[in-house]
Image (cartoon, rainbow, N blue to C red):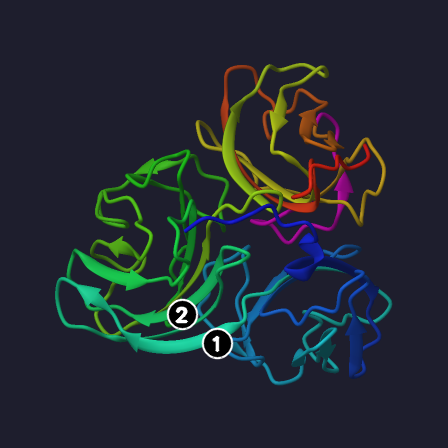
């Protein structure tokens, strides 16, 4: 299946900044296109409150947190609805999403088409449900494990995923991340700073295909009769890029070509311990971008020495020597989503940042 360059990434991803008020409030996205998100990831910027991940497949009352290993937490006050032009927050009695007088960042992805079915591969087929955008290369899949290695989960993308992010919903079990650049014989952990670990169980040492990804055994994603959620990502030209780079340890750092000007970038060292660093073009509209949030901590936003980057029209460039982003000889993976493609589908280049 072939896909042309996505000329307007705001149809599928937008970042929204807002200030909480502890009352039910509709949050309208700022992009040139109305977008109804299906996955909203919120972090309080100005306080050390944790991350909140909400999606349309689990439902608006269900919270996951990237900085800890808790399963689904039910809270009817934090989030009311996904809307045609954004989302509506509740009064938020636990200060997850609408903390009064505190600033927040919300990263919003659209999936869209919904469906359900029965999983395939080895063992007993189990129920799954999904929301997918084949145009954007993004699906949200909820499934039930069967405890048998070789259990395969359909993702409905039509192309091979490069990133699989999974979480056990029923138990306090670490987040599992599979990334093409690390290899699906290794896993990373979204809620910790640990290096990539060799693991033959999580994905059964099997790369995803254009129709399914494969589970091994164990509580990372395939315990029998346990519920799981997965966020499944496949590259789309001009919209998303998932890759790796090697750090050089100085302020004239490595340049990473993505073929687009990014609106969201998340970095993680695979060869050693480091936090997951998140950058976006709303919190930092001009270079240097050095206001960092971390997926695996509840820390407030901070400008951390040695971790700035330049977000450029065709990629990004490391501008510090921190081991978190640019240690000499260290290997890093990244996931990036676009503000605009480097060159549109009609051959017109975008402007530099």
Residue sitting farthest toward the front = 346
Provide the major secondary structure of the magenta segment.
loop
CA gap between label 1 and label 2 equals: 10 Å
Q: Residue at x 79, y 60 (%)?
A: 31
Which residue carries the number 1 mark? 58
Q: Residue at x 59, y 14 (%)?
A: 248
Closer to the observer: label 1 or label 2? 1
Q: Height in image: 24 above or below 326?
A: below
Give residue 296's position: percent from left, percent from top. Answer: 56, 49
The image quarter containing residue 154 is bottom left
Check whether the beta carbons of the residues at disc 1 and disc 2 lie within 8 A of each other: yes
- Residue 133 percent location from the top left of the image: 51, 63
In the rendering, at what x and y percent does residue 8 appear? 70, 53
Q: Quadrant of the C terminus?
A: top right
**Quick check: is 287 in the magenta stretch?**
no
The residue shown at (73%, 78%) is: 89
| Residue 49 in view (yes/no) | no
Image-based side of 54 in relation to 99, left or right:
left
In the rendered structure, which segment of residues is drawn in magenta? 293-306
Query: Up-down: is 329 above or below 113?
Result: above
Q: Classify mark 2: residues with Cα within 10 Å, few (<14), some (14-19) or many (20+).
A: many
Left or right placement of residue 286 versus residue 290 in this view = right
Sooner in the amino-acid sequence: mark 1 or mark 2: 1
Q: Is residue 69 visible?
A: yes
Q: Which residue is mark 2?
A: 169
Q: Is residue 165 left or right of residue 210?
A: right
Q: Position of residue 151 (x, y in %)?
A: 20, 61
Residue at 39% across, 34% down: 182
- In this view, the residue in front, 12 or 207, is 12
Between 121 and 51, the one lying in front of the other is 121
Disc 1 secondary structure class: loop
Kindly state the secondary structure of the residue where label 2 is placed.
Answer: loop
């Amino acid at each position: 299946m072939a896909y042309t360059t996505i000329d307007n990434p705001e149809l599928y991803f937008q970042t929204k900044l807002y200030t909480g008020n502890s009352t039910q409030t509709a949050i309208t996205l700022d992009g040139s296109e109305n977008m109804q998100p299906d996955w909203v990831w919120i972090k309080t910027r100005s306080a050390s409150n944790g991350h909140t991940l909400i999606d349309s497949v689990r439902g608006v009352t269900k919270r996951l947190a990237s900085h800890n290993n808790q399963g689904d937490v039910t809270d009817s006050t934090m989030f009311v609805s996904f809307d045609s032009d954004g989302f509506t927050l509740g009064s938020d009695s636990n200060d997850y999403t609408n903390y009064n007088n505190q600033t927040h960042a919300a990263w919003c992805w659209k999936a869209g088409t919904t469906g359900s079915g029965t999983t395939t591969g080895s063992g007993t087929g189990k129920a799954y449900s999904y929301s997918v955008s084949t145009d954007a290369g993004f699906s949200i899949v909820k499934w039930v494990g069967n405890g048998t290695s070789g259990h395969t989960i359909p993702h409905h993308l039509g192309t091979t995923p490069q990133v699989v992010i999974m979480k056990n919903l029923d138990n306090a079990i670490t987040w599992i991340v599979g990334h093409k650049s690390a290899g699906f014989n290794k896993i990373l952990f979204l809620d910790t700073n640990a290096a990539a670990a060799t693991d033959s169980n999580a994905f059964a040492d099997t790369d995803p295909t254009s129709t399914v990804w494969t589970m091994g055994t164990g509580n990372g994603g395939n315990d029998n009769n346990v519920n799981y959620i997965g966020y499944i990502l496949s590259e789309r030209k001009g919209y998303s890029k998932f890759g790796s780079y090697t750090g050089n340890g100085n302020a004239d750092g490595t340049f990473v070509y993505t073929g687009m000007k990014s609106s969201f970038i998340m970095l993680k060292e695979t060869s050693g311990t480091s936090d997951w660093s998140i950058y976006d073009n709303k919190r930092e509209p001009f270079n240097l971008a050095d206001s960092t949030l971390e997926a695996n901590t509840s820390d407030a936003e901070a400008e951390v020495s040695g971790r700035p980057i330049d977000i450029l029209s065709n990629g990004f460039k490391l501008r510090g020597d921190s081991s978190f982003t640019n240690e000499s000889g260290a290997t890093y993976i990244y996931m990036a989503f676009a503000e605009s493609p480097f060159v549109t589908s009609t051959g017109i280049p975008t402007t530099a940042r």
